[in-house]
Amino acid sequence: MSKHYLLQKQNGIIIKKTVKDWAREPQNQKKFPKYSFQRPYNTDTTPTSEEIDAQLQREGYKREIFNGDYYCYDPSDISKNDLLSKNYKTNNLINLKEFSNNFSEKKQTDNIKNTSTHPWLEKYKIEPNSKYLIIGTHPPMPYNENNLQYFYGNMKEFWRLLDKVYPNANLFNNGNPELTDILNFQIEKSISVTDMVYNTHVRRFSTDEEMGKIEDIDLNPFLREWLENSIVDTIYFTSFGGSNSAKNLFKRWIKTNYGLRGVITNSHFNEIVIPNNRKIRLIDLFSPSPTARRSKNKIQEFIVWKEMNKTDDYDMFRIDWYKKYLPK
């Protein structure tokens, strides 16, 4: 499981401490008024590491990953030159010189087959002028380098369905969607796409069911900044049933980042309010995954649609749903 640390400069020396140790310091406890910080330490008395990281990032700290662990630091206080110097404390199991050589140098495509870190999440951020945001989970890993190097590029089912919704957008292109066509479509419709998971700490998984069994998940650390710097007013989830579905991971994320609990229900239509009284609609999209057909006859909306349309075509049901709720 990943650990979360804070790097701080004290008397010219860089020291490392856990973010929970930082939060327990008396001057920092008041930043987490919901917690008592009384022993025994548990999730009722102490914020989670993700909650603390989120608070640090709100204060201007940056967060980086090194060897699977998270490090927060104040860029106005610690520079890469500081890390390259020998002026650091070494009794905390970190070689800061080695850390600095890897600092902020994440590869998006190198070794794509052998990593559980999202291969392109950082490359395609939420655009500031996007009104609509489509959220998934994480591509299957290891990812086939011959597939489309973009969201929903493995089976390409999402783009096949959207090609039926937007027939003039050329999104499927005879079974070989082109990234340029997809990005142009997104610009035209003011849509961005992202995923909820940044790192799974699991090397291999290929199905939604396997994704649902992964316990050690690091959520998208860029989402808050991207979202708040955009004009997004509608979010679509491409999965919403399992514990690690896009919708349920987003529930976890808004609890950590905004303290919102119980505001997202099992309804396919919800609304949240984030800082500055900004309202965002949340809409479920029935999963584009081919395996989703297995449970179609348990879906009340499909049962009603099937009776009305006198057909068992699950693709057409999803296309009709997408046409109704996606941007025109």
Image (cartoon, rainbow, N blue to C red):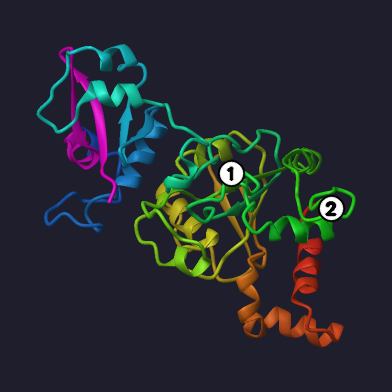
- For residue 263, above or below residue 112: below
* C-alpha separation, residue under disc 1 versus residue under disc 2: 26 Å
- For residue 85, above or below residue 106: above
Q: Residues within 10 Å of mark 2 (few under 14, many from 20)?
A: few
Residue 71 shows in the view: yes
Task: Please tell me which residue is depicted at 56% across the width and 71% down the height of the picture.
Answer: 266
Q: Which residue is mark 1?
A: 277
Instruction: Measuring from the top left, give residue 34's x and y in whole percent.
Output: 30, 51
Q: First in sequence: mark 1 or mark 2?
A: 1
Do labels 1 and 2 touch, CB within 8 Å?
no
Q: Is residue 244 left or right of residue 267?
A: left
Q: Nearer the viewer, residue 258 or 134?
A: 134
Farthest residue toward the front? 146
Q: Nearer the viewer, residue 134 or 251?
A: 134
- Which element is circle 2 on? loop
Q: Is residue 86 left or right of residue 219?
A: left
- Which element is circle 1 on? loop
Could you tell me the amino acid type at mark 1? Asn
Q: Nearer the viewer, residue 108 or 87?
A: 108
Q: Nearer the viewer, residue 274 or 174?
A: 174
Instruction: Measuring from the top left, give residue 116's x and y in whole percent.
Output: 42, 48
Range drawn in magenta? 1-26
Residue 263 shows in the view: no
Indicate whether residue 23 is drawn in magenta. Answer: yes
Task: Please tell me which residue is depicted at 18% across the width and 34% down the height of the picture.
Answer: 17
Q: Which residue is mark 2?
A: 328
Image-quadrant location for residue 281: bottom right
Instruction: Measuring from the top left, give residue 71's x and y in whole percent.
Output: 30, 33
Q: Residues within 10 Å of mark 1 (few under 14, many from 20)?
A: few
